[in-house]
Image (cartoon, rainbow, N blue to C red):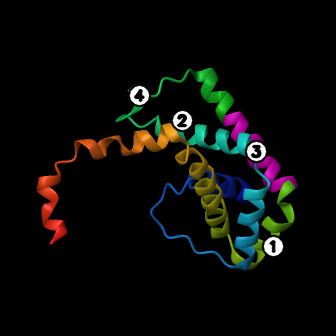
Amino acid sequence: MKKIIYIFASLSFLFNISNEPIFAGPFGDEMARCLVTSTNKRDKAKLVKWVLKVYGEHPEVSNMVNLSEREKNVIDKDVAQIFTRLLSEDCADETKKALDYEGDKVMYTAFSVLGQVAAKGFNEHPNVANSMNKFIELIDTEKLDYLNK
């Protein structure tokens, strides 16, 4: 049961969904480093797809994300496989040490780091960067002139 809690906690906070600050000790840092170096570009893309799927379930945006149940299941399966591989094979030693010395919270911190690295790769794509900056053209800069004083 404790392992299921670890999995849920890690996935819930995979992409820093919470506003909690991230503090890690040396073992958590080593675990996070292992998670990042053990995932390739394809893994990170699958993790970002999972976050999009999760956020797409919110009623405010659910009409904007049109995924079939089959697609959602494939995304969940992909992330489950990545998660299982990372914790049972690639980073098993680092995870065990981090949990032993730093406690359960290390799962949150380590996977938050992985999430940030995965999202960074997407944020740097020119299409994404251009889209993120599109709203700037619509800002009423006259109303913000007071900031220049």
- Amino acid identity at mark 3: Ile
Front residue of this view, candidates 40 and 60: 40
* Residue at 75% from the left image edge and 79% from the top image edge: 101
Which of the 4 image quarters holds residue 130?
top left
Choose the circle earlier in sequence order: 1 or 2.
2
Please give the residue where the numbered disc 1 appears in the rendered image: 97
Please give the residue where the numbered disc 3 appears in the rendered image: 82
Is residue 133 shown left or right of residue 83?
A: left
Choose the circle earlier in sequence order: 2 or 4.
2
Choose the circle earlier in sequence order: 1 or 4.
4
Q: Secondary structure at mark 2?
A: helix
- Amino acid identity at mark 2: Lys
* Residue at 58% from the left image edge and 22% from the top image edge: 69
Q: What is the CA distance from the residue labelled 2 to the residue labelled 4?
A: 11 Å
Q: Is residue 71 above or below residue 140?
A: above
Q: What is the x, y in percent for residue 88?
A: 85, 54
User: Does the CB distance between marks 1 and 2 fall below 8 Å?
Assistant: no
What is the span of residues highlighted in magenta in the rendered image? 76-89
